[in-house]
Image (cartoon, rainbow, N blue to C red):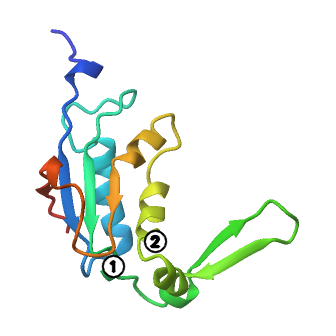
Amino acid sequence: MKTFVPKKTDITRSWYIVDATGKSVGRLATEVATVLRGKNKPTFTPHLDMGDGVVVINAEKVVLTGNKWKNKKYFSYSGYVGHVKETTAERMHEKKPTFILEKAIAGMIPRTKFKKDILKRLKVYAGAEHRQEAQNPQPLMVK
């Protein structure tokens, strides 16, 4: 018996669409990250980028449980001493509604040489309109 090891030429990519309305950020991010990496495929191989593309619509309607809207903080550092800026999730959601979901998904992708390529296949939109009609995305059921 021989073990099947996929090659770069064996990779087939498809696109999925996810509606984020009423979904919890963390639970949605884990499902999307799994599809982006390709771990949902039976031929998953860690040394190849086998993932599919994902379009997330209605990102402005995601849900954070508990007091996370007020207590969760996002930090940015300019590089200078004392120049750390912090923003709450509520303020960040008002300013850029897609940021919270993009940041959660990016944090669940391993820091390998594929991370940048994997995140290029993630498209997050605040509303219901998206520009990936040509890819013919299939609906992805997320719990």
Q: Secondary structure at mark 2?
A: helix
Dividing the picture into quadrants, the one containing residue 39 is top left
Q: Quadrant of the N terminus?
A: top left
Image coordinates for residue 59, horizontal then vertical, percent: 33, 74
Q: Quadrant of the C terminus?
A: bottom left
**Residue 54 visible from this viewpoint:** yes
User: In the visual, does 5 lie left or right of 136?
Assistant: right
- Residue 62 is tagged as 1
Front residue of this view, candidates 57 and 133: 133
Image coordinates for residue 33, horizontal then vertical, percent: 35, 53
Give the residue at x 18% y 54%: 16
Image coordinates for residue 123, horizontal then vertical, percent: 33, 57
Query: Which sits earlier in the primary sequence, circle 2 or circle 1?
Result: 1
Relative to residue 130, is residue 88 depicted above or below? below
Give the residue at x 41% y 48%: 119
Q: For marks 2 and 1, give the CA distance.
A: 9 Å
Within-10-Å neighbours for mark 2: few <14, some 14–19, many 20+:
some
User: At label 2, which amino acid type do we have?
Assistant: Ile
Dividing the picture into quadrants, the one containing residue 62 is bottom left
**Residue 6 visible from this viewpoint:** no
Q: Secondary structure at mark 1?
A: loop
Relative to residue 112, is residue 127 depicted above or below? below
Image coordinates for residue 54, horizontal then vertical, percent: 26, 54
User: At label 1, which amino acid type do we have?
Assistant: Val
Front residue of this view, candidates 85 and 112: 85
Disc 2 + disc 1, Cβ < 8 Å? yes
Dividing the picture into quadrants, the one containing residue 79 is bottom right
Q: Which residue is mark 2?
A: 100
